[in-house]
Image (cartoon, grey):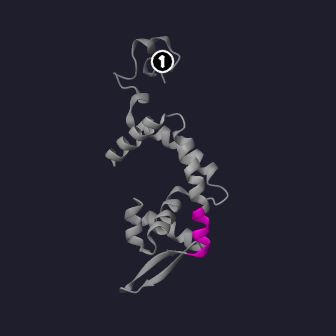
Amino acid sequence: MPDADRLPVPDDPSRAERPGIDGYVLEDQIGHVMRRAFQRHAAIFAEGIEPSGLTPMQFAVMVKLYELGPQSQNHVGRLSAMDAATMMGVIRRLLERGWVARTPDPAHARRLLLTLTEDGEAVIAKALTAARRITAETLAPLSEEERGVLLGLLKRLT
């Protein structure tokens, strides 16, 4: 590629004269900042949730089942903000691990409910303790007040 067609590299002195590209600075964009914050949290989660090896989506489903008891797959998918295709894969893996079971819904003959097994309840009870530490570590750089503000603002965006 000819030199004239190349974008300046970060240590290029001409870059100081043009911050970003026509005023666009990637590091100031909400999507980029949120992705970086999520990457940090995901690494903390993966390390802190061991030895269960739960994914964030599996964790969300199990928390909702632990909190609410048996639920339809559709309902727990909505509560944990997952589309149907993703939910199917998450449930399949939880069923394979023996942490969730499908049981008939006594109120609706054709509907099945998801319920935690005894092993699933034990796993999520331990995972909730780890989750509290994970949240604390993720938010550690912020003051108590900043944590509340951040969570409040992010909730407004969802």
Residue 154 located left or right of residue 12: left
Residue furthest to the left = 156
Magenta stretch in the rendered image: 117-125
Q: In this view, does 74 lie above or below 134?
A: below
Q: Tell me residue 12's x, y (percent).
A: 50, 15
Disc 1: which residue: 3
Disc 1 is placed on an element classified as helix
Front-most of 31 and 17?
31
Q: Tell me residue 156's x, y (percent).
A: 32, 45
Residue furthest to the front = 144
Q: Tell me residue 115's x, y (percent).
A: 50, 75
Query: For the image shown, how many numbered marks are present on the structure?
Result: 1
Q: Is residue 13 magenta?
A: no
Q: Residue 29 falls in which quadrant of the image?
A: top left
Residue drawn at (51%, 65%) of the image: 62
Q: Is the magenta stretch mostly helix, strand or loop?
A: helix
Residue furthest to the right = 51
